[in-house]
C-alpha cells in the first residue's frame, strides 16, 4: 500500500496464552521483549481459550460425552494473551492505534508495559492510542482477561429476576455462555474478533452509513454519511470521493468533510433494487469512499450497498392490527427461523460456517433469520452472507430473559457505548430489517411481577428510553420494537405485534393479561402441536418443538457402550429443563419408543409434523398473520434441541419439511369442528393457477374418492379450495377405516408439493408394512436415487453419515405405484458412494 494511505495490519500471528490463578502471579517480565514464554501456548486470533486448549490437547473435546464438566476450571482462571511486533519501516503517519474488534470480556490491554485500554464489554471494540509509544523493534502487547465468574460472584443480584442463571446480569457478555436449555455451560474468554494495528495518515474513515431514503417509479434517493477522524491538526483540506458502482454504471461525487463528516444525498436513476431471494435479485452495489487530504487519497473504505426500503405495517388498510414487513413497497410473508451462536467457541467460528448455514436457510425457502438476544451481535460474515444471499435479519439487541441494572450509571454508560457501536456496525447492511430491544424481558416481567410484588421493571430505561433515543440519531430507516414479543395488553398478546408461542411444547396457557399469574398445562393435550390452531397472532416470531438429532451425531459424541435409549449419556445431550415433555409429545402423537432408532424417528417425526401443522396454520391466515420464524435454526454443540440443522450441519427431518412448507405455493389441510378444507397459499407476486386432485385412499393405493378442482389464488393471497362439512364426509369419502385411510392433495405443477391429511394420530395408523425398491446410479458429483414402494410408505428417510451430504428431498411420504427420484450430492465435493446411503420408511425396513 502506498505510504500516504492509512495502513491496516492484522495482528493474527505470534500470539501466546497462559493461565494464572492471581494477577499477582503474572511476571513483570511478560511486558518485555524477548520474554522467555516457557509453558505458553500458541493461540489463534481471532479465537478463544477453549479452542486453543483443545488444539494443544490440554483438554479433551468438551462436546464428547460429559467432558464439558471437566473444563469448568477454565472460567476461574486469569488468562493472558501476549505477542510481539515490530513497527513498520515507514513511520510516515499521524497516528497509530491498536484496535481490538472484540475482547471477551473483562480485559485490560498493555502496550510495552503501560496500560493502554480497558474493556468491560464483549460487544464493544477496544482501542489503544499508540502515537509516540511505538518502538522500532520488540513492541509487546499483553491482554489480561479477568474471570467473569469471579466478578459476577461479587455483584448484588438480589433485586432482579433472571431465567437460566444470575451471573450474567451485570456482564455485557454472550448470555448463553452460562448455559441455556439447548447449550452446555462454556464460559468463553479470549480475543474473539480481529486485532489491528492502524497507522493513520492525516485522517481516517471511521464509519460509513449508506441508506435508501425513497424509491420512485424511475429512481431512488439515497444518502451516504462518512464519519471521519482527523489526526493532522486541521491543516489539510479533507474531501471524500464517493463512488456507487452498479452493473454497468458508476455514480461519482466529491464532497467536503465538515465537522468530521462527509454527507451526500443523491439520486440513482433506474436502480437495481435489493430483494429477498424469493421475490427478486438481492442486487448489491459497491460503495467506494476515498478520503482525500489536499487531493491525495489517505484512506479508503469499500462496502456492499443495497438500494431498498423496509417498513413494518402495523395496521391494515381498514385499521386492524398487523405486523407485516414491507420491502420496496410490497408486503412479504416472513418465513424463517431463529439464529443462535453457530458454535460455543464463538471466536473460532469460521466464515465458511456462516455461509453454509445461510445457504441451507435459503435452500429451505427462508427469507428471514432472527438474531436472538441471548447470543452475540454476529460477525460481519453473517450479515454479509445474508445481504448477498437475500435474507432479511430481525436483529435483537443482546438482552434476554432477565432484568438488568438500569439504575447504575456505569452499567448504563457501558450499554450506551454498546448500542452506538453496534448500530453503526450494522446499519448499512440491507439485510437488517428491524431493531428489537431484547428477547422476552417484558413478557417474563409481566409474569414475575405478580409473584414478586415489586412492579418495577429493571431495564425499562434501556428499552424504552436509551435505545429509541440513540436510534433517533443513528438510524431512523427501520422500525424499533422494544422487545420480542411485544404488543397488546400483554407483551405476548395475540392481538397485536409479534408473539412467542410456547403453549406447544412448554404448555403455556394463552391468552393472559398483563400482570396475571402464568398458567401451565403440561399434559399431552396442553403441549400438543394441535394447539397452534388456537393461535391468532399477527406475527409468530418464536415457536418450536424439540427433536432428536441424527444418529451419526450421537454416535460421534457418545461412547459406543452408552449409545442406547434411556441412557444417561443420551439424556445429557438434552439440556431442556423439563425433558419429560419429549415423552409427553411422543406419547400423544407417535407413541413411546422402545429403542434408540425408534426414538430418533419418533422424535424427529413429532417435531417435523408439529412445525408443519403450525406453519401451515400461520400461512393460511395471511395477511392476518404475516410471518413465522421457527425456534431454532441451528445448534452450537452436538446436542438434542429445537434446531432444524444440527451441529455438524446434518439437516433433521424438520429441515426437509421446512423446504416443503416454506415453498412459495403451499397446499394444506385445515380441520375445524369436524370440517375438512383444502387451502392454497400463494406468497409470490403472481397469480397462482393450477388444477389439484384430491383423493381419499388406503395404504394399498385404492381410492374411495377422487376429484379435480381448478385453483386460482391472487398474488400474495390465501384461500380455501374446497370444504367438506362433517355430514358430507362419510357419503363423499365412503365408510372408511380412518386408521388406514388418508387424504392426498396433488398439484398438476412440478413446483408445488403434494400433501397428506391423516384422520388419526401416527400411533393409531394401521398401515401395512411396505417394501421399498431402491436403485442408485452414480453420476459425476452426485448419485441419483430412485425409490418406489408397493404400499404407502410413511416418512421415507435417506441417511448418509458423511458431512455436508444433502438430498434433493428427504423424509417424505410415497404412494404405491409412484417412483420418486432423489439426487444426493456433497456440498464440499467429498466423495459419496451408494454404499454410504441407507433408505428406510417408518413402516418399512432399511435398504442399502
Image (cartoon, rainbow, N blue to C red):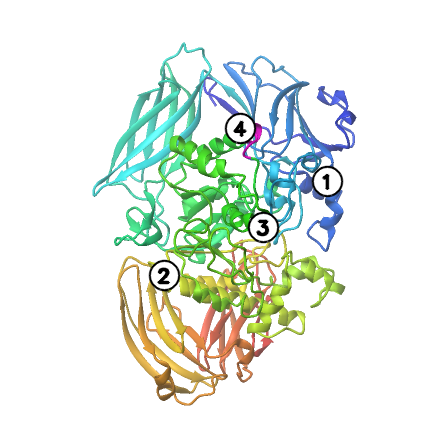
Q: From the top left corner, tell me how far across and down residue 39 is, in percent.
A: 78, 32
Compute the Cα span from label 4 to label 1.
29 Å
Camera-near label (4 vs 1) is 4
Which of pointers 1 and 3 lies earlier in the amino acid sequence? 1
Q: Which one is nearer the viewer's eye here, 668 or 51?
A: 668
Image quarter of the C terminus: bottom right
Judging from the image, what secondary structure is the residue with disc 4 in? helix
> Can you say whether 574 is above or below 775 in the image?
above
Taking the magenta stretch, the answer to whether it contains residue 603 is no
Query: Which label is found at residue 74?
Result: 1
The chief SS type of the magenta part is: helix
According to the picture, the residue beneath numbered tag 2 turns out to be 664
Looking at marks 3 and 2 on the same chain, the residue that comes earlier in the sequence is marked by 3
Determine the secondary structure under disc 3.
Answer: helix
The residue that disc 3 covers is 451
Q: Residue 621 at what x, y percent from top left?
A: 36, 62
> Crowdedness of circle 2 by 10 Å Cα count: few (<14), some, many (20+)?
many
Label 3 and label 2: CA atoms lie apart by 45 Å
Q: Secondary structure at mark 1?
A: helix
User: Which contiguous range is marked in magenta?
Assistant: 406-413
Q: Nearer the viewer, residue 176 or 256?
A: 176
The answer to whether the residues at label 2 and label 1 have Cβ atoms under 8 Å apart is no
Q: Are marks 3 and 2 in contact (CB under 8 Å)?
A: no
Residue bearing the label numbered 4: 413
- Residue with the most extreme bottom position: 735
Disc 3 versus disc 2: nearer the observer: 3
First in sequence: mark 4 or mark 1? 1
Q: CA distance from mark 4 to mark 2?
A: 46 Å
Within-10-Å neighbours for mark 3: few <14, some 14–19, many 20+ = few
User: Which residue is found at the position 44% from the left and 46% from the top?
Assistant: 394
In the image, residue 201 sits, relative to residue 645, either above or below, namely above
Category of crowding for the residue at label 1, using alpha-carbon neighbours closer than 10 angstroms: few (below 14), some (14–19), many (at least 20): some
Amino acid at each position: 500500500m502506498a505510504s500516504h494511505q492509512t495502513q491496516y495490519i492484522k495482528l493474527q500471528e505470534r500470539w501466546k496464552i497462559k493461565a494464572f490463578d492471581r494477577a499477582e502471579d503474572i511476571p513483570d517480565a511478560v511486558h518485555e521483549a524477548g520474554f522467555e514464554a516457557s509453558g505458553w501456548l500458541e493461540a489463534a486470533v481471532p479465537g478463544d481459550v477453549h479452542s486453543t486448549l483443545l488444539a494443544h490437547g490440554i483438554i479433551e473435546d468438551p462436546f464428547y460425552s460429559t467432558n464439558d464438566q471437566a473444563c469448568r476450571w477454565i472460567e476461574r482462571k486469569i488468562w493472558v494473551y501476549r505477542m510481539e511486533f515490530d513497527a513498520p519501516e515507514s513511520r510516515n503517519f499521524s497516528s497509530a492505534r491498536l484496535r481490538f474488534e472484540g475482547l471477551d470480556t473483562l480485559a485490560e490491554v498493555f502496550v510495552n508495559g503501560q496500560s493502554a485500554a480497558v474493556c468491560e464489554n464483549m460487544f464493544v471494540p477496544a482501542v489503544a492510542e499508540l502515537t509516540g509509544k511505538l518502538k522500532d523493534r520488540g513492541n509487546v502487547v499483553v491482554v489480561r482477561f479477568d474471570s467473569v465468574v469471579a466478578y459476577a460472584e461479587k455483584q448484588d443480584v438480589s433485586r432482579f429476576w433472571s431465567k437460566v442463571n444470575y451471573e450474567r446480569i451485570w456482564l455485557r457478555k454472550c448470555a448463553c455462555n452460562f448455559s441455556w436449555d439447548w447449550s452446555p455451560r462454556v464460559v468463553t474468554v479470549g480475543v474473539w474478533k480481529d486485532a489491528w494495528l492502524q497507522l493513520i495518515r492525516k485522517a481516517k474513515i471511521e464509519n460509513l452509513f449508506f441508506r435508501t431514503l425513497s424509491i420512485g417509479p424511475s429512481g431512488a434517493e439515497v444518502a451516504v454519511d462518512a464519519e471521519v477522524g482527523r489526526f493532522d491538526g486541521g491543516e489539510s483540506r479533507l474531501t471524500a470521493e464517493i463512488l456507487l458502482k452498479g452493473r454497468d454504471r458508476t455514480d461519482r461525487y466529491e464532497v467536503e468533510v465538515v465537522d468530521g463528516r462527509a454527507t451526500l444525498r443523491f439520486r440513482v436513476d433506474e436502480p437495481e433494487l435489493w430483494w429477498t431471494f424469493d421475490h427478486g435479485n438481492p442486487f448489491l452495489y459497491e460503495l467506494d469512499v476515498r478520503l482525500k487530504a489536499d487531493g491525495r487519497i489517505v484512506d479508503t473504505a469499500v462496502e456492499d450497498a443495497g438500494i431498498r426500503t423496509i417498513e413494518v405495517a402495523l395496521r391494515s388498510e381498514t385499521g386492524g392490527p398487523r405486523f407485516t414487513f414491507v420491502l420496496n413497497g410490497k408486503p412479504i410473508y416472513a418465513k424463517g427461523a431463529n439464529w443462535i451462536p453457530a458454535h460455543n467457541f464463538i471466536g473460532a467460528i469460521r466464515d465458511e460456517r456462516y455461509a453454509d448455514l445461510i445457504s441451507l436457510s435459503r435452500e429451505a425457502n427462508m427469507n428471514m433469520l432472527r438474531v436472538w438476544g441471548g447470543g452475540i451481535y454476529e460477525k460481519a460474515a453473517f450479515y454479509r452472507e445474508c445481504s448477498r444471499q437475500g435474507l432479511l435479519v430481525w436483529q435483537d439487541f443482546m438482552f434476554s430473559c432477565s432484568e438488568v441494572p438500569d439504575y447504575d450509571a456505569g452499567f448504563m454508560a457501558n450499554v450506551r457505548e454498546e448500542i452506538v457501536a453496534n448500530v453503526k456496525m450494522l446499519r448499512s447492511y440491507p439485510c437488517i430489517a428491524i431493531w428489537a430491544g431484547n428477547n422476552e424481558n417484558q413478557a417474563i416481567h409481566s409474569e414475575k411481577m405478580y409473584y414478586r410484588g415489586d412492579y418495577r421493571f429493571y431495564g425499562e430505561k434501556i428499552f424504552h428510553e436509551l435505545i429509541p433515543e440513540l436510534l433517533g440519531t443513528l438510524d431512523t430507516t427501520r422500525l424499533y420494537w422494544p422487545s420480542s414479543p411485544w404488543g397488546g395488553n400483554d407483551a405476548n398478546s395475540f392481538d397485536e405485534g409479534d408473539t412467542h408461542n410456547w403453549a406447544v411444547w412448554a404448555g403455556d396457557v394463552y391468552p393472559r393479561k398483563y400482570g396475571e399469574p402464568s398458567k401451565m398445562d403440561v399434559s399431552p393435550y396442553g403441549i400438543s402441536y394441535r394447539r397452534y390452531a388456537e393461535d391468532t397472532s399477527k406475527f409468530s416470531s418464536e415457536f418450536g418443538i424439540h427433536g432428536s438429532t441424527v444418529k451419526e451425531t450421537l454416535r460421534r459424541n457418545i461412547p459406543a457402550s452408552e449409545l442406547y435409549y434411556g441412557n444417561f449419556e443420551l439424556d445429557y445431550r438434552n439440556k431442556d429443563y423439563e425433558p419429560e415433555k419429549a415423552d409427553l409429545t411422543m406419547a400423544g402423537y407417535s407413541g413411546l419408543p422402545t429403542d434408540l432408532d425408534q426414538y430418533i424417528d419418533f422424535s424427529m417425526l413429532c417435531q417435523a409434523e408439529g412445525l408443519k401443522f403450525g406453519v401451515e396454520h400461520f400461512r393460511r391466515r395471511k395477511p392476518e398473520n404475516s410471518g413465522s420464524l421457527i425456534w431454532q435454526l441451528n445448534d452450537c454443540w452436538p446436542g438434542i434441541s429445537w434446531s432444524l440443522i444440527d451441529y455438524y450441519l446434518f439437516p433433521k427431518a424438520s429441515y426437509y419439511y421446512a423446504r416443503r412448507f416454506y415453498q412459495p405455493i403451499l397446499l394444506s389441510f385445515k380441520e375445524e369442528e369436524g370440517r375438512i378444507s383444502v387451502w392454497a397459499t400463494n406468497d409470490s407476486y403472481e397469480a397462482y393457477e393450477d388444477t389439484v386432485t384430491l383423493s381419499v385412499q388406503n395404504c394399498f393405493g385404492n381410492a374411495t374418492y377422487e376429484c379435480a378442482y381448478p385453483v386460482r389464488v391472487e398474488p400474495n393471497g390465501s384461500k380455501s379450495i374446497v370444504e367438506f362439512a362433517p355430514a358430507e364426509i362419510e357419503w363423499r369419502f365412503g365408510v372408511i377405516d380412518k386408521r388406514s385411510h388418508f387424504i392426498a392433495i396433488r398439484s398438476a405443477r412440478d413446483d408445488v408439493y403434494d400433501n397428506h391429511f391423516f384422520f388419526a394420530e401416527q400411533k393409531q395408523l394401521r398401515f401395512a408394512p411396505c417394501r421399498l425398491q431402491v436403485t442408485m446410479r452414480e453420476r459425476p458429483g452426485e448419485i441419483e436415487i430412485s425409490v418406489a414402494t408397493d404400499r404407502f410408505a410413511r416418512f421415507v428417510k435417506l441417511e448418509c453419515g458423511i458431512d455436508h451430504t444433502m438430498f434433493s428431498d428427504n423424509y417424505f411420504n410415497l404412494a404405491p405405484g409412484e417412483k420418486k427420484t432423489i439426487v444426493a450430492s456433497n456440498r464440499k465435493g467429498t466423495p459419496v458412494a451408494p454404499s454410504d446411503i441407507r433408505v428406510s420408511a417408518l413402516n418399512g425396513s432399511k435398504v442399502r
